[in-house]
Image (cartoon, rainbow, N blue to C red):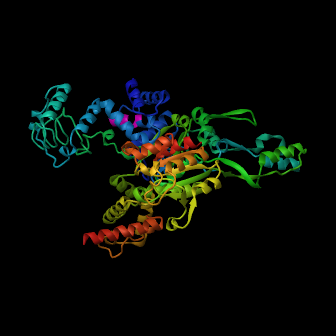
Amino acid sequence: MSNEFQGTDRYIATDELMAAVNAAVTLSRPLLIKGEPGTGKTLLANEVARALGKPFFEWHIKSTTKAQQGLYEYDAVSRLRDSQLGDPKVKDIRNYILKGTLWEAFDCDTQPVLLIDEIDKADIEFPNDLLRELDRMEFYVYETHETVRARQRPVIIITSNNEKELPDAFLRRCFFHYIRFPDAETMTKIVDVHFPGLKRELLHEALTTFFKIRDTPGLKKKPTTSELLDWIKLLVAEDIPPEALRSDEARKLIPPLYGALLKNEQDVHLFEQLVFLNRRNSR
Amino acid sequence: MLVKFFFLLRNAGLPVSITELLTLLEALKAGLGDMSAERFYYLSRTCLVKDEKHYDRFDRAFAEHFKGVEDIFSMLQRQLPPDWLEKLSVRDFSEQEKAAVEALGGWEKLMETLKKRLEEQKERHQGGSKWIGTAGTSPYGAYGFNPEGVRIGQEGGRNRSAVKVWDRREFANLDDKVELGTRNIKIALRRLRRFARQGAPDELALADTIDATARSGGWLDIKMQPERRNVIKVLLLLDIGGSMDDHVNTCEELFSAARSEFKHLEHYYFHNFVYEALWKDNRRRRNEQKPTAEVIRTYGPDYKLILVGDATMSPYEITHAGGSVEHWNPEPGSLWLERLMKHYPKFAWLNPVPQGRWRQTASIDMTRDMLKGRMYPLTLAGLDQMIDALT
């Protein structure tokens, strides 16, 4: 296993992304990843773990997630119940402490990769509650009066969709990288990795159509890489010939199986209108 | 090391701190950045920049520091008519030609000559070897070859290796002054939330239950509490029609975001300026108006007042009775705005006109003065300022 991340057979990383990941791994500092949805933010951590041969932990954040849940939880309710039933377990508080993902990652003997997914979904104070944990990689368990320290500082990859601004103090402790939407060249590589046997022609037509749709002004939600991959999967499954994608020749107004790319009816409507206008003008 | 660069970034408005500089130095020490200039650029960006909206500023500062000439470029760019530099053709040079233009003197001399040329030259120029323009061997202008050349207004990479990554400035449109999408507005408005527990108790209050159970000697004593709700109240007054037609998209976005974000949102429309009546439905504006005085009576001072309008009109429409363009108003609009401001201590005005153009319109200036400066541009940054004023 090499110590440098260079993308994998399933994941194409740009130079800038590799530089960011390697900096984070070398200095074992958290790496904050932002970018358009569907550009492979969540997948990155998984692939880093795979490429570097490290164990992988993931912690998915919801709007109700508290920082404490990543460390540990004290199950007061079951202890209360056990006490009413007279269970002997009740004597030891350790029986009611449930380890969180962060604790498990800290307990790992080899350096693990920890994904904290969609940190912006949580409450605004959430990142602040993790400052010391991410900085010193340790935390204190009040119930048992012990300090849990990371055996190996984990590689932490945090993703954000920019729904909330993250506090400065938190950002200071992280490396930051913004995944840009891939250009046509990178996109070809990405599709190649996912559909190795794809006909050149079909790929070319599909990418042209895809970037044309992305360029349509006023779309509520632009299609992303993961949607492109879904769409190609469908095209292959349905065995659509490349010619059908050339919108100026095809009889249909919009590309086949567009449902994989355009996700709401206003966008479909808008796109139909634009295609219609285009054809009228070109005649 | 890099201290000058660090201060340059700070001056460029990037929020970099000493911790981050130290991190970068640590990374360099670990041997992460010494491969190439490009690696160093990526590494320093990863360490120092924490928000993609700052990427463009970083790129500019980076280019400035590592070339030291960007300042002079922008000065020149402002003075040069851009069509001189428009790319029309790209010329290929032979090795001999390249050698022939090899050096015309030091940097300062180049700049001096450039200034002189600028004064002499009055027309657009392309090709050739003296004047400023594109695709020539003169050291001035872009898309050509002169190793010591000054590049003016080159848009992108004609030759990939020649254009540095930071010069491409691909993040130019991610700076935070761009217009907003609904999602961004929602996020911005979310900061206005105020949570409080109101209504029927239908949630288990765990802490209270444990407390009460402990007090009653271990017997379960369940306590309930009402759900947490957003209790912020917003009164939104929107300018509609006329000059606002240009901004209708932005206002729609703001409106739909506000609708989904606030439970207590009341909205009314006005035309150009607030007078004695407002209306809820534009189709029935003639017969279903609500007197402004009644609106003020209905919604208490705990509402936050947000006016949205371009404030672009004739000053008479603000200051004079009968000044309104579409009806006879017995009292001037300024009086009505004052009454609103008096009743609602938390008020703000959002203006979709770009802030840079505010000074050009007298009525915007007047309105802004009346609002004691609480007029903000309808951008994310403007919304943030507005929320600071409202809370």
Q: Position of residue A203 (x, y in %)?
A: 34, 63
Residue beneath the point at 52% across and 68% down? B284
Q: Is residue B183 magenta?
A: no
Given residues B332 and B286, the one toward you in this image is B332
- Residue A233, can we see it? no
- Residue B122, can we see it? yes
Given residues A278 and A201, the one toward you in this image is A278
Given residues A97 and B345, the one toward you in this image is B345
Given the current orientation, which residue lies at the most extreme right position? B217
Q: Position of residue B251 (x, y in %)?
A: 47, 56
Report the side of A178 relative to B267 (left or right): left
Residue A213 lies, with reference to residue A280, above or below; the image says above
- Location of residue A191 by image quarter: bottom left
Specify the principal SS of the magenta part.
helix
Instruction: Classify the position of the C terminus of chain A by image quarter.
Output: bottom left
Residue beneath the point at 44% across and 43% down? B366
Report the side of B51 relative to B233 (left or right): left
Report the side of B85 relative to B270 (left or right): left
What segment is highlighted magenta in the picture? B37-44
Q: Position of residue B177 (x, y in %)?
A: 42, 44
Report the side of B99 relative to B152 (left or right): left
